Structures are given as structure tokens and as C-alpha cells.
Image: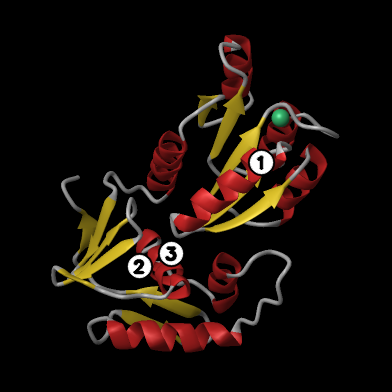
């Protein structure tokens, strides 16, 4: 998945980027409200971690502007400890969840997972599609109960295809989820990655929809223990 982090504290920003990246996501980061607002406006994200106390434009204003513009990605706000007014204002402005600083990184990751599940309408942390089982907590994939070794690009592709199961995803859309914002996004390489991923999955799992993109077709998709 693709996550935006907007946080002005250099140390915390680096920690967030690392932890969310290690959880198997593509992370973009902005250090102030202006850049953060811009990224959230022009790019698609599956979730945003937004600090409220930001230079240039404060987090609440950023959030209100996104919502006014119809940007509906899930947003987790980071608030000052015990400032309950901030939480209320944040939720009123359209935040989906909040976390008070200081927080444990594990808790932040769990809340981000919950936001992503809601977005994908998954009720469980383990997603299943036929013989494929993806554990969103551990960046782990099982095929017929056995661990499947995937590169980070392959994992990101598979998790997006599973999250949006049955939907056709274009090469551009897949490329956006794999490559960082400022990199050269060559959607032709997506074909290569899909090709490699296909070889590791049961035959026919990923369907090519000519001229449109790819979709995960297994009819046995669902959540485990949902
Ligand atoms: Ca701050």
C-alpha cells in the first residue's frame, strides 16, 4: 500500500518512514503542511499519517482542505498528549483515527493496518484468495500453507491486487503504488514484476485485461476468521 507521512519532527519522521516501510508499504514523507497538502491532493494514498502541529500550514487545515476537495483517503492524526480538544477538532475535520504523542510504533502500525482494512473492506488482518494467504501484520505470504518468498515489489503488487480483488488495476496505478513519488515510474517494468509474481502463484491467478491492466481472479477470496 502507499502511505503518506506528514511530520515536521525529523527524528519521528525518519522513524515513521522506516517502520511503515518495513511493514511492506511504499512511504512518501513531507516535512510541512504545504508539501503534505500538495502530495495528498495530487497523489493517491491508501492512508495518511498526519501530524497536527506543522509549519507552513497546520495539520487541521490540511485535513479540512483535502476533505473539502473530496480527498477521502483514511487519515490518522497525531495529536499532542492530553489535548482532547485537538482530537475532537481532528475528528470533526474528517480524521478517521488519532494517536496521542508519544506513542509506541507498534500501536501506530496496528492503527494504520486497521485503516487499510477498512479501506479495502477487509475485516481481518489476514487476507485469503484461494490458496494465497497474506498476513498484513508480518509482510508474509503463504501459498497452500507454505511460506512464499516475494521481493518487496512483488509483495506490494500482490497486496494491492488482493486488497482490490476483482478490480482491474492499470499498470500506471500499480506503478504508483510501487515507486516513490519522485522516482521515474516506468509502468513497463510492472509487466516484468507481474510476470515474476505470476510464476510464483497458482496458474491463472492474475488475469491480464487487455488494454486495461491486471486483476486477481480467484473466486475464493475472503478474510480469514472474519
Ligand atoms: Ca509537529
Q: Earlier in the sequence, mark 2 or mark 1?
A: 1
Q: Residue at x 53, y 71 (%)?
A: 174
Front in this rendered view, residue 199 or 63: 199
Residue density around tag 2, few if under 14, some if 14–19, many if 20 or more, within 10 Å:
some
Colour mapping used in the image: secondary structure
Q: Quadrant of the C terminus?
A: top left
Nearest to the eye among marks 2 and 1: give it: 1
Q: Residue at x 64, y 25 (%)?
A: 93
Q: Is residue 168 above or below residue 189?
A: above
Q: CA distance from mark 3 to mark 1?
A: 29 Å
Q: Can residue 46 be seen at all in this image of the molecule?
A: no
Q: Is residue 143 above or below residue 95?
A: below
Q: Is mark 1 within 8 Å of ligand 1?
A: no
Count of number-bearing discs:
3
Q: Position of residue 110 (x, y in %)?
A: 39, 39
Circle 1: element type: helix
Q: Position of residue 124 (x, y in %)?
A: 26, 46
In-image side of 131 versus 123 (left or right):
left
Q: Position of residue 200 (x, y in %)?
A: 29, 83
The residue to which callout 2 is attached is 166
The residue to which callout 3 is attached is 160
Quadrant field for ligand 1: top right
In-image side of 133 versus 153 (left or right):
left
Q: Quadrant of residue 136?
A: bottom left
The residue to which callout 1 is attached is 11
Amino acid at each position: 500500500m502507499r502511505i503518506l507521512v506528514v511530520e515536521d519532527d525529523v527524528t519521528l519522521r525518519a522513524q515513521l518512514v522506516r517502520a511503515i516501510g518495513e511493514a511492506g508499504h511504499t512511504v512518501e514523507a513531507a516535512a510541512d503542511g504545504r508539501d503534505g497538502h500538495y502530495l495528498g491532493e495530487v497523489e493517491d494514498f491508501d492512508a495518511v499519517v498526519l501530524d497536527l502541529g506543522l509549519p507552513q500550514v497546520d495539520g487541521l487545515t490540511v485535513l479540512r482542505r483535502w476533505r473539502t476537495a473530496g480527498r477521502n483517503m483514511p487519515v490518522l492524526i497525531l495529536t499532542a498528549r492530553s489535548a482532547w480538544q485537538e482530537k475532537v477538532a481532528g475528528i470533526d475535520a474528517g480524521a478517521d483515527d488519532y494517536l496521542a504523542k508519544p506513542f509506541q510504533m507498534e500501536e501506530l502500525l496496528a492503527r494504520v493496518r486497521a485503516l487499510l482494512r477498512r479501506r479495502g473492506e477487509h475485516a481481518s488482518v489476514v487476507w485469503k484468495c484461494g490458496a494465497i494467504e497474506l498476513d498484513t501484520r508480518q509482510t508474509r505470504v503463504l501459498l497452500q500453507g507454505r511460506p512464499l518468498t516475494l521481493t518487496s515489489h512483488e509483495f506490494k503488487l500482490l497486496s494491492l491486487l488482493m486488497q482490490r480483488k476483482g478490480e482491474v488495476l492499470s499498470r500506471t496505478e500499480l506503478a504508483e503504488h510501487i515507486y516513490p513519488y519522485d522516482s521515474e515510474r516506468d509502468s513497463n517494468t510492472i509487466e516484468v514484476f507481474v510476470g515474476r509474481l505470476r510464476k510464483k502463484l497458482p496458474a491463472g491467478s492474475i488475469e491480464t485485461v487487455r488494454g486495461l491492466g491486471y486483476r486477481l481472479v480467484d473466486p475464493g477470496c475472503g478474510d480469514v476468521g472474519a
